[in-house]
Structures are given as C-alpha cells and as structure tokens.
Image (cartoon, rainbow, N blue to C red):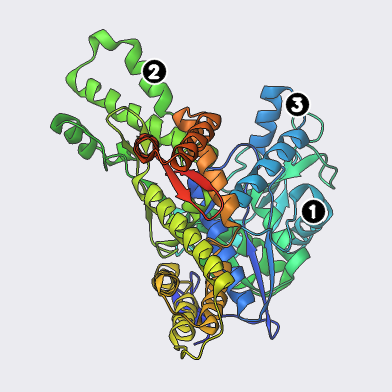
C-alpha cells in the first residue's frame, strides 16, 4: 500500500503529501547548539532518518532539511560563562551533535541550514510581516508578532487564543509589547552581549527570535507548502504554531502540507527502584516529583546540607532526588553511550511506535553498577543481527549451486516489512518481519543443504531491511570491536591480558593439555569473555 501518516494538523491519517510528483520534502527542527543532547533529543532524528530511508527505498527523491539554531540566548550565556565567542560554542556543539548522530546510525540530512547563515532572509520576512500588519517594532528596537492579527492562531495545537501566555515562548524582554501573548521576532542587542551575537537590521543591531528562524529557513530551502514538517511534541506549541502564524500571512499558502510529531521519551524513576513503602508514598503523592528538573541537584544539595534536622518525609525526598539526579546524568546521550552502544539506543527507540511515549528505565546491580535493562536487551538483539550477517557471509563463501527449490519467504517478509512502515511509519510493526528474516537466515545457515540462490535472496533481504531501518547495516567486525572495547574499558580489563590467555590456551590445545585449555576458557567466560575458535585462529569478544 502507499505510505500514509498521522497529520497533527487535521488529527487524521492522510496519504503522503506530494507537492512534486516522485519527490518528498521534509523539514525537522534541529538542536539549539549550546550543550550536549539528551536521549529525548535523539528520538526525532532517528524517526525522521527512518522516514527518509524508507521513502528513498520506495524510489522517491527525498529532500530532507534539519537546521541548527546557532543563534540563541542560551548560546550567548555559555559563551559569556566560558569567555569565548558564541560562534565557537555553536561550532563545538554542532561537531558533538554530528558525532552523536553518527553513533545513532543517522545519515546526514540533505540540507543543514543555520540561523547565522539565514539572516538576510529572516530580516526580509520580518519586514514583510510588519508591512502586512502582522508585526510591530518598538522604540527599544525589538519587533513582536501581533498574535491577534492571525485568525487561525492555535489551529495546530488546538489551543484557544484567550489562554495563550507569553511564557510558552522565548523572548519576553522589552517594554513595548502590546499584548502578553505577542512573541519576539527580533531582539535588540544588549550592552553586555559579546561580538558575534548581533546583526544589523532596520531596527538596529540585534538577533532574531527563536520562531522566525525556522519560517525563514523552510521558505529559503524548501519553498512554500513543502510536504512534511516534523518535530517533538514540545514544539507543537508554541514553536510550530508560531511558524505557521509567521509564514502563512506572507507566503499566502499553508506552511507544510502535513505535520508529524513524535512522542516523548519519559524517565520512569520508580521502575527498578528499591524504594521503601514510605518513599513510594511520598513519590506517588506528588506527580511533579516524577519529572526531571534542572533544579533537582540544587534541591538535593539543600536537603543534604541540613541532613541532621530532616523529617521522615524529607529523608524520603533525598532518596527520590538522588535517583532523579542519577537519571538526569545518564539521560545525556554522550554519557549513556559509555554504557550502551548508540545502535542499541536506535533499535530501542524503533521498538515503540513513534507517536507513543517511550520509558527510559534505569536499574542497579548489587555491586552498585548502573544498568539499562531495555537498552541492554536491545544491544543483545543488535549483536544477534550482526552475528547472523557474519554467518550468512561465511555460508555463502562455501555454498554451491544446487537444484534445491527456493521459497517465497523473503519476498513476502519484505512486503510485510514495507507495509508496516507505510502504515504511519510503524517501526514496531516492521521489527516483526525484520526479526523473522534473521531467524530464517539462521535456519538456512545451520542447515546442511541450502541453495546458493536462497542464500543470495537472504542476503538481499537482509541488506534491504537493515538499510531501511539503519540497524545492523554496518561492518560487523567494526561493531563487535566497538562494543568489546567499551565493555572491557568499563570492566577495567587489559586486552593484552586476554590476548596472552588466548595464546596460552592455543598452546595448551596444541600440546593436547585439554584440561588446561578448558580451564582458561572457563576463567575467561567467568570474566565475560567469549572465545570463538575459527579455522585459522581464535578470536574473542566481551559479552
């Protein structure tokens, strides 16, 4: 069937929009580059990477843009704190973001526009909005969007105009706002702000507000009425709502033909926690305690500072805040990748439909080591996929042409795989045929007689589904080397010690001292090292 998606604007399942036959244009809001991203920030790039891959596999031309917000108050704050330029801050975290995307298996988008490179278009759009009566400048050199001028304001988020508040957006500075819900299009430069944080404009030096940036970039790179605009649920309002309000009065057309919003990745601090009943009672009495906040660490420190005088409830709060702070530390993707592989994070994300919430769970071993049960399970599955690919390659190397009949299994499995992705990018549903393909490949590799033709069909199917999902499509040797390197580092194992024991075992076997060889294998197994005896040598992995 043809691809269909859930459109957030109409709140309905709709056919894939097609402004240009055979082509799909996609814009996804990218990061504000002032720090390292967290796991929740990873969901959107993975989801829309799969969308681009799948549509490309269906022979569509995909033009996918994901921006960098490299001009922002938060970037300026980091620059001032570190005594560096805003540009240096942005460049550092753009490089970090690209590294994270590569670790997740995300391909680079077709376009990666930056706010700093879009200033003429941003200024021109603000000028046009003022001319249309949709915006106004103040005496201080700020420019605001007049929300009351746009009759359809709230149509995406389904919010009523009379409950809008300025705190939902960025840019509340300035004394000349006519209404509380109006939002900043241009912010005048402040005396304390460094060079590289201001640009010329008809209203004086300053920088754009957050929302206007995407309106200008989408128009400049994808044009009006592009096919799909994507992002997280937190962007639906006010960011995407404001993009629509800024774009449609000037360009006279819908900003995008369809809107895709993925669900949150939530932190379940209660799961796998050994909280006593009295602690659980405190946690369950206040839903806000379940939310991770930047203030959690300071609150924890404040409680600990007067530890001797704490009430029973406050002692319970200490345990809750300790777990929240630990969650927050590991929720940073760069930190998480010290414990699990980025490809495992990707597979874990794809195991849940993109519009559904996904729980990030954390546990503890008896020795105090942190564990990530769901993602660790995903990593084991990815190892299985790479193992299967290696088996298939080895089997093909020795396979001979036979008269054995081939089945239609792989053709049917590929159709089921595509049908799931065509159904509103149902990656969770696509993983069923994906896993069945690998199970069948293992059966063929373990069978005594398998036709070379069927093995080649298996190879084509594996290549197709791994390329579409971006899972287990890399070099297997590189994957296992990466995972083993991380695991032995965490365990404090010197690889030279393992190599020496492997050599000692080989010598023992050559000398027919099988008891000694078996003992070495058992000792290594106890340390989480798996030996693999090949035709010419023995290799090892950390498991």
Seen in the picture, residue 403 relative to 167 is either above or below; the reply is below
Q: Kindly identify which residue carries mark 2.
A: 301
Viewer-proximal residue among 354 and 362 = 362
Q: Looking at the image, is mark 2 or mark 1 nearer the viewer?
A: 2
Q: Nearer the viewer, residue 535 or 44?
A: 535
Name the mark nearer the viewer: 3 or 1: 3
Q: CA distance from mark 2 to mark 1?
A: 43 Å
| Position of 110 relative to 511 (above/below) | below
| Mark 1, residue position | 118
Q: Earlier in the sequence, mark 3 or mark 2?
A: 3
Residue named by callout 3: 84
Label 2 sits on a secondary structure element that is: helix
Mark 2 crowdedness (10 Å alpha carbons): few <14, some 14-19, many ≥20: some
In the displayed structure, would residue 106 be above or below residue 314? below
- Residue 33, given in percent of the width and then of the height, sits at 66, 42
Mark pair 3, 2: CA separation: 30 Å
Residue 427 at x, y = what percent? Answer: 45, 68
In the picture provided, is 101 more to the left or to the right than 543?
right
């Amino acid at each position: 069937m043809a691809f269909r998606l859930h459109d957030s604007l109409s709140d309905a399942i709709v056919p894939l929009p097609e402004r240009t036959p055979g082509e799909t244009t996609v814009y996804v809001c990218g990061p504000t580059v002032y720090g390292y991203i967290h796991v929740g920030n990873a969901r959107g790039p993975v989801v829309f990477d799969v969308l681009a891959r799948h549509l490309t596999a269906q022979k569509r031309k995909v033009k996918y843009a994901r921006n960098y917000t490299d001009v922002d108050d938060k970037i300026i704050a980091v620059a001032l704190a570190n005594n560096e330029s805003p540009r240096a801050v942005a460049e550092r975290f753009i490089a970090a973001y690209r590294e994270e995307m590569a670790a997740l298996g995300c391909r680079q988008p077709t376009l990666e526009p930056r706010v700093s490179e879009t200033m003429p278009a941003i200024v021109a759009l603000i000028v046009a909005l003022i001319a249309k009566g949709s915006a106004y400048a103040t005496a201080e050199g700020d420019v605001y969007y007049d929300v009351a001028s746009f009759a359809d304001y709230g149509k995406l988020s389904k919010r009523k105009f009379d409950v809008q508040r300025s705190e939902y957006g960025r840019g509340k500075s300035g004394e000349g706002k006519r209404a509380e819900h109006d939002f900043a299009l241009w912010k005048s430069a402040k005396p304390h702000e460094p060079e590289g944080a201001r640009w010329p404009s008809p209203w004086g030096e300053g920088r754009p507000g957050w929302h206007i940036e995407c309106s200008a970039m989408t128009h400049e790179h994808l044009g009006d009425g592009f096919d799909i605009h994507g992002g997280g649920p937190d962007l639906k309002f006010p960011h995407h709502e404001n993009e629509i309000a800024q774009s449609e009065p000037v360009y006279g057309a819908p900003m995008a033909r369809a809107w895709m919003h993925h669900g949150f990745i939530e932190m379940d601090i209660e799961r796998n926690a050994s909280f006593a009943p009295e602690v659980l009672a405190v946690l369950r009495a206040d839903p806000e305690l379940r939310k991770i906040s930047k203030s959690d660490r300071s609150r924890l420190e404040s409680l600990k500072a007067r530890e001797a005088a704490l009430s029973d409830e406050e002692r319970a709060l200490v345990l809750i805040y300790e777990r929240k702070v630990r969650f927050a530390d590991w929720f940073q993707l760069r930190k998480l990748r010290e414990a699990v592989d980025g490809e495992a994070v990707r597979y874990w994300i794809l195991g849940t439909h993109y519009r559904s919430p996904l729980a990030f769970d954390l546990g503890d071993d008896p020795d105090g080591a942190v564990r990530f049960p769901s993602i660790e399970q995903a990593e084991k599955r990815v190892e299985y996929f790479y193992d299967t690919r290696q088996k298939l390659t080895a089997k093909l190397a020795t396979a001979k042409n036979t008269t054995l009949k081939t089945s239609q299994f792989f053709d049917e499995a590929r159709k089921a795989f595509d049908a799931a992705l065509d159904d509103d990018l149902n990656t969770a549903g696509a993983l069923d045929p994906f896993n069945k393909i690998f199970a069948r490949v293992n059966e063929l590799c373990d069978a005594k007689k398998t036709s070379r033709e069927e093995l080649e069909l298996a190879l084509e199917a594996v290549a197709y589904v791994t390329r579409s999902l971006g899972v287990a499509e890399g070099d297997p040797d590189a994957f296992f080397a990466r995972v083993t390197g991380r695991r032995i580092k965490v365990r404090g194992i010197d690889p030279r010690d393992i190599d020496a024991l492997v050599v000692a075992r080989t010598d023992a076997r050559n000398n027919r001292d099988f008891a000694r060889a078996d003992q070495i294998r058992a000792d290594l197994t106890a340390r989480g090292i798996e030996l693999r005896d090949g035709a010419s040598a023995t290799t090892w992995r950390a498991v």
